[in-house]
């Protein structure tokens, strides 16, 4: 049994019979063909599956199930167990016609009318998928046959009221935007806010239920992209015609009004969608059955934090979870610490190849239908996995982004990062969730349907931000990516400016790599909301806004030289107040520490400019072709 030739033969037989995990079998086959030794755990796995295959073959592929019927009329046993999936009703025994409505329950099929009569006589715990065609004729395998429960057939749509505090904050924000536009540059600002309102109305009205990202049409940039590109020229022409300014001052003023329009558009769109998202998330129900979740924890030199991460996973409330720690050739005691839990956790050791390589190795050993990724320095919330499973209850959802929180809030820098995460997730990401086109499923806590991730191509090691790249590939495949704000995880943030620089250097260079790699999205309508909305928004935030923000500083300096001190103070004050209101909304949505709101001013002055400079530095390095390197912050043992 232990010879490579024998093992190869067994693997091929298992693959032909479609028995066992296809990814793991492929990995074992690849190792054997190269003459490599395989793990003892792999040999045991092959033995177990081969024994199951032999038992299956001994009964000619037919396997009887001992299911207890709920007041079913007496019919031949073969109708109940559906040997070879016969096209018979398990209640009346008659054929299931293609034109008839049928219902599946406990791996059996019924006429819809027969099933309804049974429901009247018995209280059924679970309702199941109703379809219009009978099951296909194919060999029966207990390992691959699964019942997919859904909600009860006749239910009233649930409704929930919006949080009145959030509605009040939103009303104040909109009033502030109108006052700001009216007070700044007379009718030019009113035109800018009007254009923003039209764009918001268009995006909300044109949105369709995101069952798929795919759509078809002539290759061209989206209307949103075109609008954003032509507005500087339109506003610049108006400013020049009316004689507001000329030369460099005119250009800076044009940029300022354009930025004003983008700010108005984002606020007017994302604020109401965020409130709506809070209400909709409250309606998510517990699934009738929880799918198996495989949690992957890639680790490289994480001896200071890996124990806490593993113990938080073991304590997580979920009925069917599998924890896989992938040691990516660590040089410290990471493998030794992880191995202490090998009776409860799968521990994989491999040569160092990077995070993407470690994740792909973990996927090969994962047996769950859902893959959840957790960073080695992250503590998962007690009920996070259950909330992730809730979000996957909709069939068309292929990935779910978790809610990442900063747990080491010890100084101004970490508090600013905590507020940045909170605002981005609770305001911006909730808006993207409305379109089913969230662009980043974070490596700190994110989940994919295993089959969908494999179809999209798993993780790629040629970028520094493998989570961003994998998410875009899933969206490109026509799938929907949503978020779960109830699925929380607590991660470490850099506490020192040097570590912060190293982290953001990797992030921003990696983001630009992904944008360049998937640049065809910009002109291909096939990719739906990724083309229409999400990708152009990414380009604006990563390339345009950092550049224009520094130009706005030039506009401010120009106004100060003219002696318009009160005007600068008014504009600056309005934007600071706006940021405080947005931060208050985010804190309210997430029920987080109210102290965080106090740091809102730094997202307008100070921290904001630091981020802009680092993004522009990354852009410069990308343009001149400097080699991008993996950099990470120093871990703090807690």
Image (tube, rainbow, N blue to C red):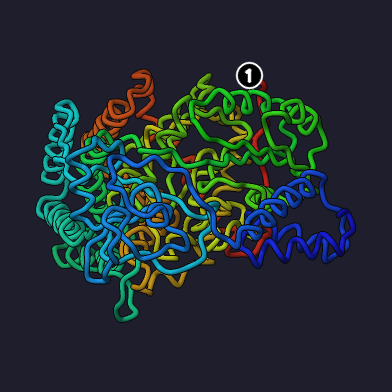
Q: Quadrant of the C terminus?
A: top right
Image point (66%, 58%), residue name: 58
Closer to us: 167 or 599: 167
Q: Point out residue 46 in the picture as x, y percentages from the top left corner.
A: 74, 52
x 31%, y 65%: residue? 532
Q: Callout 1: few (<14), some (14-19), or many (20+) C-alpha neighbours within 10 Å?
A: few
Q: Badge 1 is on which residue? A: 638
Q: Position of residue 156 (x, y in %)?
A: 14, 40
Task: Indicate the position of residue 71 as horizontal and vertical percent values.
Answer: 27, 40
Looking at the image, residue 457 sits to the left or right of residue 609; the answer is right
Q: Quadrant of residue 173?
A: top left
Q: Judge left or right: residue 319 versus residue 29.
A: left
Helix, strand or loop status at disc 1:
loop
Residue name at image x 24 percent, y 42 percent: 152
Any part of residue 380 in sight: yes
Q: Is residue 244 left or right of residue 63?
A: left
Q: Is residue 298 above or below residue 543?
A: above
Residue 222 left/right relative to 137 = left
How many marks are shown on the rendered structure?
1
Residue depicted at 13% across the width and 63% down the height: 242
The residue closer to the viewer here, 126 or 288, is: 126
User: Considering the image in quadrants, where does the N terminus appear?
Assistant: bottom right
Farthest bottom residue?
A: 218
Expressed as whole percent of the image width and height from the top left, the position of residue 479 reads 40, 60
Does any portion of residue 413 appear in the rendered image? no
Q: Is residue 604 above or below residue 614?
A: above
Of the pair 12 and 119, the residue shown nearer to us: 119
Residue nearest the viewer, comparing 633 with 398: 398
Q: Quadrant of residue 69?
A: top left
């Amino acid at each position: 049994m232990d010879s490579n030739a024998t093992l190869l033969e067994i693997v091929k037989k298992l693959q032909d019979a479609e028995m066992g995990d296809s990814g793991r079998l492929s990995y074992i086959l690849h190792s054997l063909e190269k003459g490599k030794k395989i793990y003892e755990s792999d040999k045991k796995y092959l033995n177990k599956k081969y024994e199951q295959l032999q038992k299956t073959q001994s009964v000619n592929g037919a396997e009887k199930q001992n299911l207890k019927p709920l007041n079913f009329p007496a019919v031949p046993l073969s109708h109940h167990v559906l040997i070879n999936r016969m096209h018979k009703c398990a209640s009346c025994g008659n054929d299931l016609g293609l034109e008839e409505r049928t219902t599946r329950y406990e791996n059996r099929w019924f006429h819809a009318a027969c099933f309804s009569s049974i429901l009247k006589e018995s209280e059924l715990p679970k309702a199941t998928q109703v379809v219009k065609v009978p099951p296909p004729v194919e060999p029966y395998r207990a390992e691959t046959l699964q019942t997919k429960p859904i909600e009860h057939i006749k239910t009233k749509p649930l409704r929930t009221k919006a949080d009145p505090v959030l509605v009040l904050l939103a009303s104040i924000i909109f009033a502030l935007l109108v006052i700001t536009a009216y007070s700044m540059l007379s009718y030019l600002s009113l035109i800018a806010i009007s254009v923003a309102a039209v764009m918001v109305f268009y995006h909300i009205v044109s949105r369709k239920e995101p069952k798929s990202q795919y759509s078809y049409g002539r290759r061209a940039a989206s209307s949103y992209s075109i609008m954003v590109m032509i507005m500087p020229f339109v506003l610049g022409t108006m400013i020049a015609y009316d004689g507001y300014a000329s030369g460099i001052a005119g250009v800076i003023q044009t940029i300022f009004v354009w930025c004003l329009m983008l700010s108005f558009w984002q606020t007017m769109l994302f604020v109401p969608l965020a409130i709506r998202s809070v209400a909709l998330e409250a309606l998510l129900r517990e699934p009738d059955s929880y799918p198996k979740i495989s949690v992957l924890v890639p680790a490289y030199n994480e001896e200071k934090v890996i124990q806490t991460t593993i113990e938080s996973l073991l304590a997580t409330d979920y009925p069917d979870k599998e924890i896989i720690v992938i040691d990516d050739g660590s040089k410290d005691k990471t493998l030794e610490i992880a191995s202490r839990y090998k009776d409860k956790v799968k521990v994989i050791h491999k040569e160092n190849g990077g995070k993407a390589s470690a994740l792909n190795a973990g996927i090969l050993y994962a047996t769950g239908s859902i893959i959840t990724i957790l960073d080695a320095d992250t503590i998962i919330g007690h009920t996070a996995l259950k909330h992730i499973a809730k979000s996957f209850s909709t069939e068309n959802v292929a990935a779910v982004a978790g809610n990442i929180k900063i747990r080491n809030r010890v100084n101004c820098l970490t508090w600013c990062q905590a507020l940045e995460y909170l605002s981005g997730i609770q305001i911006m990401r909730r808006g993207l969730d409305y379109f089913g086109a969230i662009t980043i499923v974070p490596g700190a806590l994110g989940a994919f349907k295993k089959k969908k991730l494999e179809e999209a191509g798993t993780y790629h090691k040629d970028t520094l931000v493998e989570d961003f790249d994998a998410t875009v590939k899933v969206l490109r495949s026509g799938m929907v990516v949503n978020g779960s704000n109830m699925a929380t995880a607590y991660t470490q943030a850099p506490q020192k400016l040097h570590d912060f620089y190293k982290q953001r250097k990797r992030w921003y260079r990696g983001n630009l790599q992904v944008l360049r790699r998937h640049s065809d999205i910009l002109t291909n309508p096939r990719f739906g909301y990724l083309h229409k909305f999400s990708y152009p928004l990414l380009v604006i935030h990563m390339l345009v806004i950092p550049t224009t923000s520094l130009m706005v500083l030039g506009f401010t300096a120009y106004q100060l030289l003219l002696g318009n001190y009160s005007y600068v103070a008014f504009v600056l004050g309005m934007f600071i107040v706006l940021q405080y209101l947005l931060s208050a909304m985010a804190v309210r949505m997430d029920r987080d520490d109210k102290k965080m709101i106090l740091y809102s001013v730094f997202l307008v002055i100070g921290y904001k400019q630091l981020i802009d400079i680092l993004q522009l530095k990354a852009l410069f390095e990308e343009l001149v072709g400097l080699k991008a390197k993996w950099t990470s912050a120093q871990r703090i043992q807690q």
